[in-house]
Amino acid sequence: MKRTAVRRVQRVLQKRAEPAVATAGVRAEIVSFGQRMSSSGLSPGKSGNISVRVDGGMLITPTGIGYHEMRAADIVEVRLDGRVAPGQRVASSEWQMHLAVYKARADVGAIVHTHSLNATALCCVHRGIPAFHYMVAEFGGDRIACGPYATYGSEALARIAVKALGARHACLLANHGAVAVAETLRKAYERAGEVEALAAQYARALAIGRPRILNAREMARVVEKFKTYGKQTELKAKS
């Protein structure tokens, strides 16, 4: 083979290898958080799914593989137009929902979808989570909305999820489960846990009596405070 032909083949092989190398760490992170999600009970069995935005598309968990059997090589890359390169696993049935959220929300870098116990219980009675506690404001508004029912894995459900999220960081889906989004996978996972905690508190409050809902003015104040909550700043020395 001529030297120029060899170089051409080497360049092609290098281009094919680069995406795998660039996403290797992300794939491993998805598997790690999927296993944590399963072990913690946040999403039992093979339920739920996780994705991370990457250049030109997303990486998402495959369908039908238990999280503790899942390996980094099983994570599926889906392009923005929905194409999947040959030789990969079959993507999660909810890939359309994940892709629709990424297209609608440039600020979202990762999505965690769970079937957690208390959040799903609220979904099954078509209840969102209102401003019964100020921590609801951490999700960017005065409620965590519950979108109407649509068949899992459908385009209709994808549209519903986008609408239910709006500009907020989480939503519920009727008769289904919860969706949490963030800039990073770690933060999206944390938010998924926080949604479940709020759902448990709200369900308990409903069992006790009628929860007192905070008004819109107070929630707007708390939403604003959460923009700087937890961010460490240097204290200026007094002169």
Image (cartoon, rainbow, N blue to C red):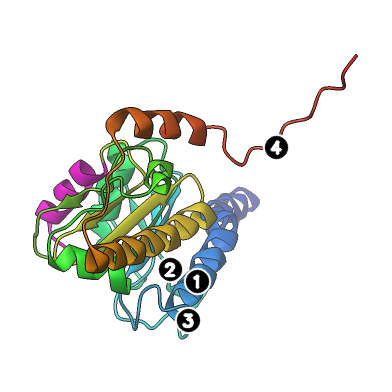
Mark 4 vs mark 1: give the one in front. Answer: 4
Q: Residue at x 49, y 77 (%)?
A: 35
- Mark 4, Cα crowd under 10 Å, few <14 / some 14-19 / many 20+, is few
Mark 3 vs mark 4: give the one in front. Answer: 4
- Place of residue 187 in the rendered image (x, y in percent of width and height, measured from the top left): 51, 52
Quick one: label 2 or label 1, which is nearer the N terminus?
1
Instruction: Work out which residue is located at the far top of the displayed protein and give it.
Output: 239
> Image quarter for residue 56?
top left
Quick one: label 2 or label 4, which is nearer the N terminus?
2
**Badge 1 element:** helix
Residue 75 numbered mark, or none: 2
Instruction: Name the quarter where the N terminus is drawn.
Output: bottom right
Residue 31 numbered mark, or none: 1
Instruction: Work out which residue is located at the far front of the displayed protein and give it.
Output: 209
**Badge 3 element:** helix
Find out whether the residues at labels 3 and 1 contact each other: C-beta distance under 8 Å.
no
> Image quarter for residue 101?
top left
38 and 5: which one is in front?
38
Q: CA distance from mark 4 to mark 1?
A: 30 Å
Q: CA distance from mark 2 to mark 1?
A: 8 Å
**Badge 4 element:** loop
Mark 3 vs mark 1: give the one in front. Answer: 3
Q: Which residue is mark 3?
A: 39
Amino acid found under the numbered disc labelled 4: Gln
Q: Which residues are magenta?
A: 153-165
Q: CA distance from mark 2 to mark 4?
A: 35 Å
